[in-house]
Image: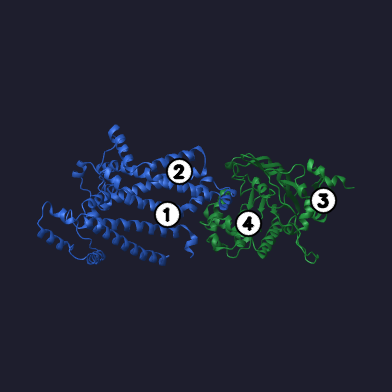
Chain colours: A blue, B green
Amino acid sequence: MARYAAQRLLLMIGILLGVLTITFILSRVLPGSPVELMLGHRPTPELIEATKKELGLDQPLIIQYFTYIGEVVQGEFGKSLRTGRPVLEEVGKRIGATLELTTLAIFFVVLIGVPLGVISAVRQNSILDNGLRATTIAGMAFPAFMLAMMLQMLFYGELGWLPLQGRLDSEVLLDSTFPRHTGFFLLDTLMTGDWRAFGSAAQHIVLPALTLVIITLATVTRITRNMMVEVLSEEFIRTASAYGLPSRRIHYGYALKATLIPLLTVVGLTYGYLLGGAVVVEFVFDWPGLGGFMVFSISQNDFPAVMGTTLFLATAYLMINLVVDLLYFVVDPRLRAQ
Amino acid sequence: MSTPVLQIAGLRVEFPGLLRTVKAVRGINLTVTGGTVMGLVGESGSGKSMTAMAALGLIPKPGVVHGSVKVDGFEVVGRRDAELAPLRGGEAAMIFQNPMKALNPFFTVGEQMTDAIRCHLPFDKKAAIKAAIAALESVHLPDPTFTLDKYPHQMSGGQIQRVMIAMALACQPKVLIADEPTTALDVTVQAQIISLLRELVATQDRTILFITHDLGVVASLCDNVAVMYAGEIVETGSVVDVFADPKHPYTQKLMNTVPRLGAGDQNLNFIPGQVPDMGFPPKGCAFHPRCDQADDKCAASAPDYMIFNNDHKAACHRLDEAP
C-alpha cells in the first residue's frame, strides 16, 4: 500500500506539471495583456516596455515557462496583477469559503443520497424507486444558476426566511472578531461560542449548499441504487437471509459495504466536481470563494492568479482522488492482501 | 427417532411472467424424519434447489409458493420475513453450492459467524465467538481462532464449505438443508466434505435434506432418496430399495449414467433429450418425451404413485401393467 501511495504521488506530480504547462500556454496564447490592465489608459510605450521587463514578459516564452516552473517549485506563485498581493495569500483567504461550502454539500449529498439509493434498490421498480429516479434526475438536469436564483426568489423574496447572498450579515461581519482558524465559519464560530455569528453563517450557507446538493444528488443516489441492485442478487446476500439476519443489517451492513468502492469513487469525483464547479453558485450567491475569484481573474488577464488558483484546485482534486484510492484498501480486504 | 422434522406437502413454486408462468415445483410431497438423511436427486432445472429455498421461505419475488412446508411443525409457507427469522439459521440451516460466493468478501469469517449466531442465541460478543470456535472445531478446521480473523478470499473452497457447515450447525438446527454442497469442489475435497457430513450424522444424529445430482454421493450418505424430474417427485424410497430395484424409467436411466469401473462400458451413458421448459411442461407424464417405453397413455394422463414394499413409491404407467 505504501508503494502504491508513492506511485500515485509521483503520478500526481506529473499531472500537476501538465496542468501547469497547459494553463501557462493558455494564459500566454489568449488575447489581451495584463500590462494594459495594470497601466490603465494611454500608457507610454516606454512605460509598457518597463512594465513588461519588470514582469519578465519580454523574455522568450520558453524562458518565462521555466522561470515560472522554478518559482512554483519553490512555493512562489507570484503576485496577483490585479490586487498586487501574493497569489498564495489571495487563494488562502478564499479557499476556506469554497471548501466549507463544498464539504457541507458533499456531506449532505452522501447523507441523503446513500439511504435514498438503498431504499430504491430494496424496492426496485416500485413507485418510490421510479419517483426518486425522476426527481433526482430532474434536479441534476436543472441549470445551477437558474436553480440558485429560484431558491433565492422563494426563500429570500417570497418567504424572507433566508438571506439573499454573502457569507455573513454585514453587521455581524463588522462586530465579530472570531479567529479564522479553519476558514470554515461554521466551525470557527462554534469553537469560540460566537452564537450570533454562527447563526448568521448557518443561514447564509443553506441556499448555496442546497443548490449544490440538488444538482449532484442524482449521481450518488443512482450509483448507490444500481450497485445495491447488483449486490443484492449476490449469493452472499442469500446466505445472510438464509441465516435470519435482519434486513436492516443485510441492506446497510452486508450489501452497502460491498458497494463502497464504486460509491467512494463517485463521491470523490463529485466532490472534485463541486470544487471546480461551484463557480456559478458562488457567483450567484456572492460567496467569497475561489470560484468567483478565478472568474474575475480570467476576465482581467491576471495570469498569476489564474494559474495559482488552477494549480490549487487541480491539487485539491487529485488529493481527493488519492484519498479515495487509498480508502479502497481500507474497505476491500482483497486489495489489502496484495 | 421417527418424528417428521421436515414435512413438505403439495408444494408448488411458480414464477408468473407476462407470457408464461414457470412452474418450478409442481406439487411435491416429502417427509424427512429426525436423524435421517434424505437425498433429493435430479438433473439441473428439476426444481431441487427451489424446493430447498422454499423450505426456508427464501423464494425470491415474483415467485409464488403454494402448499405446505413444516419445519418441526412450524408452517413456513405464507410467512413474512420477520416471522421466518428465528427459523432461518435457527431451526433450519442451509449450506450452498458455491462456497466461494456464499460468504461476504468484505467481512471476516468470525464477523459473519457471530452475526448469524447472535441472531438466534442470546449471546454477547464473547460468547458468540466461543460458540463459533466450538463449531469450527467440530468440523475439524485447524486453528479455529485464527480462522475467525480470515476473510473468505484467504481460504479454499473446501475450507469455506467447512465454515458454512460449522455456521449452519452452530445454532443446533433441527434440519440441515445442503444444496449441492460438493458440486463446486475438487473431487478429493468433495470426499472430505461427504465424510464430514457422514460423521456428523453418525455422531450428532443430524437430520439432513441433501440435494445433489450425484447418485454416488446419495448411495454413500443418504438413508432415503427422492428422485425429482420436472418439478415432481417420480420415485422415492429407501436408498437400499431404490438402488436395488429402481422402478421409474427415469431413475433407471439416471443410474445408468453413473460410470462403473470394470463394467465394460466403452461409452458414457446419458439420457437423450433435455429437461423440459418449465414454462410449458409436457402433458401427461412429464418424462414421456424422453422415455423409450412411453405410449399414448403416458402422453395423455399423469400417472399415480404405485406403492411397493417399505414405502418405495414410483409414478409411471408402465408399472400398472407389470405382472
Reading the image, the residue beneath label 1 is: A265
Is residue A298 visible from the viewing direction of this image? Answer: yes
Reading the image, the residue beneath label 3 is: B247
Q: Mark 3 lies on which chain?
A: B
Alpha carbon distance from label 2 to label 4: 36 Å
**Near-viewer residue (A277 or B64):** A277
For label 4, the SS is helix
Reading the image, the residue beneath label 4 is: B165
The numbered dot on residue A146 is: none
Q: Which amino acid does label 4 sit on?
A: Ile
**Which image quadrant for residue B153?**
bottom right
The numbered dot on residue A116 is: 2
**Does residue A69 lie above or below A119 as drawn?**
below
Sort mark 4 into few (<14), some (14-19) or many (20+) by Cα contacts within 10 Å: many
Is residue B35 visible from the viewing direction of this image? Answer: no
For label 1, the SS is helix
Asked if labels 2 and 3 share a chain, the reply is no
Tag in front: 2 or 1: 1
Q: Which chain carries label 2?
A: A
Residue that appears at 30% across and 45% down: A281
Residue B20 location (% of width, % of height) = 65, 40
